[in-house]
Each structure stands twice: as C-alpha cells, then as structure tokens.
Image (cartoon, helix red, strand yellow):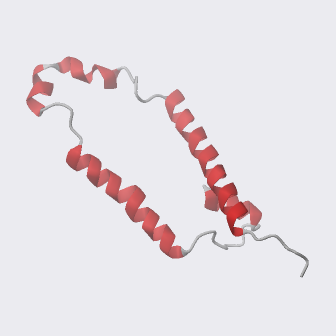
Amino acid sequence: MPQYYFGFNSSFSGQTLYDPFIYQLYNITMTSLPIMWYALYDFQHFKGRFMSNPLLYKLGMNNSCFSIRIFTQYIIYALFHGFLIYVFCIVVLVQPDNGM
C-alpha cells in the first residue's frame, strides 16, 4: 500500500519508494515464513479429538471468526496502516529544501 500511495506522489512514473532488495525481503519474511510457521506449529487439539467431538467445528460454521464485516475491517485497517507507513517514510526520507 505505501508503494501505491507513492504512485500518486510520483505521478505513477514507475519510481520505487524502496530498494528492490526490500521487496524480496518482504516476500520472504511476510508471505512465506508465516505460512510455514503456521503449518508446522499450529494445533489446538489432536486429530482424534476433532473426530470424536464435532462441536469443535461450530466456530467455523457460524462464520464467527470470518465474515464480510470482519473482512472489510481488515481491509480498512490495511489501507490506514499503509498510509501511516507511507507518511512516515516521506517525512523521514524527504529532506527540506534550505534554499541553498
């Protein structure tokens, strides 16, 4: 999102806000590693317990953890946090012109 917001600032010229290495680092750390961590270490109950107690699936069937309203909240939070990161980067990286 910060790169998208930066597109407005740079008139969508193709200029990047970050170094290309940072984009690759993001892809590794924020998209692949959390999925692998979740797949390896996430379990609350053993498989036999799920088979013997089907009420454990009730949370997912009622959409109490994921619905259109919750999804929309996540999107709004992402847009807002992306804008905050963009503003922070612009404030830190842009040096004021002293007229010299």
- Please, is residue 68 above or below residue 33 in the view? above
**Percent x, y of residue 98:** 87, 75
Out of 31 and 91, give the one closest to the viewer: 91
In this view, which residue lies farthest toward the bottom?
100
Vertical placement of residue 48 versus 55, above or below:
below
Q: Is residue 31 above or below residue 61?
A: below
Residue 47 rendering spot, x and y as whole percentages: 12, 33
The image shows a total of numbered marks equal to 0
Residue at 33% across / 57% down in the picture?
A: 33
Residue 46: image x %, image y %? 12, 32
> Where's the N terminus, which quadrant?
bottom right
The quadrant of the rendering that contains the C terminus is bottom right
Q: Which residue is drawn at 58% across and 40% down?
A: 77
92 or 83: nearer the eye? 92
Q: Name the residue at 63% across, 68% down.
A: 17
Image check: 20 left or right of 96?
left
Quarter holding residue 92: bottom right
- Expressed as whole percent of the image width and height from the top left, the position of residue 12 reads 72, 67
Residue 64: name its quadrant. Answer: top left
Residue drawn at x 21%, y 32% is: 44
Left or right of 33 in this view: 16: right
